[in-house]
Image (cartoon, rainbow, N blue to C red):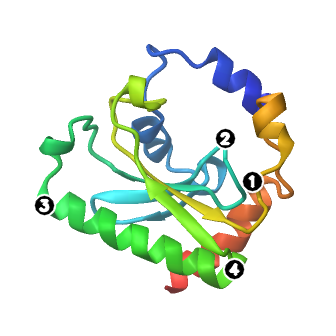
Amino acid sequence: MAYIQAAKEQGEDDGCIFCDLPAEGDDARTKILIRGQRAFVILNSFPYNPGHLMVAPFRHVGDLGAVETDEFAEVDALLTRSVRALEEEMEPHGFNLGMNLGRVAGAGIPGHLHWHVVPRWNGDTNFMPVVGQTRVLPELLDETYARLLPRLESV
C-alpha cells in the first residue's frame, strides 16, 4: 500500500526522482543498483514484474535529441549489463526494453528520460492487471535488490 499511496500522492511539482534519489547517496535505500559516470540503474518502485529496472542519465534531460553521445553510450552499456545480470539471476524467458516519450505516451516522469528493462516469463500475465488494475509480485523490492546488486557489480 505504501507504493500505491506514494504513486497517487506524487505530483508534477514534487521534484524528479531521477535527480533526487541519486543525490541522496544511499543507494541501498533508494534501490540504485549501479552508478556509471553519466547514468545509473535503479529498481522501479512500481514494477510490472520482479526485476523491473530503469536506466537513466544523471543529467536532467527530457528531450531525446538533447542526450549527448557519451550519455547514450553509457545508457546502452548499462542496458546490456542489466539484461545480462537479470538473465543470470532470474532466468527470464524474454524482456521488454523501452521508454515512453511524453506524458501522453505513458511517461510518468516526462522531464527526465529513462529506459525500462522488464524481465518476462511465459504466463507472467494474470487477471489482476487486466481486471483489478493492480499487480501482484512474488518478491519484495528489497529481496530483488539484494539478488541483483552482486550480479550487476560482476557483469
Q: CA distance from mark 4 to mark 1?
A: 17 Å
Residue count near mark 2 (Cα–Cα under 10 Å), binned few <14, some 14–19, many ≥20: some
Secondary element type, mark 2: loop
State the image quarter where residue 38 is shown.
bottom left
Q: Residue at x 66, y 75 (%)?
A: 93
Please say if 57 is above or below 113.
Answer: below
Residue corresponding to mark 4: 91
Q: Earlier in the sequence, mark 2 or mark 3?
A: 2
Q: Residue at x 13, y 60 (%)?
A: 69
Mark number for residue 69? Answer: 3
Secondary element type, mark 4: loop
Residue corresponding to mark 2: 46
Q: Nearer the viewer, mark 1 or mark 2?
A: 2
Residue corresponding to mark 1: 141
Q: Residue at x 35, y 66 (%)?
A: 36
Disc 3 marks a residue whose amino acid type is Thr
Q: CA distance from mark 4 to mark 2?
A: 21 Å
Q: Residue at x 33, y 73 (%)?
A: 77
Mark 2 in CB contact with mark 3 (< 8 angstroms): no
Disc 4 marks a residue whose amino acid type is Glu
Q: Nearer the viewer, mark 4 or mark 1?
A: 4
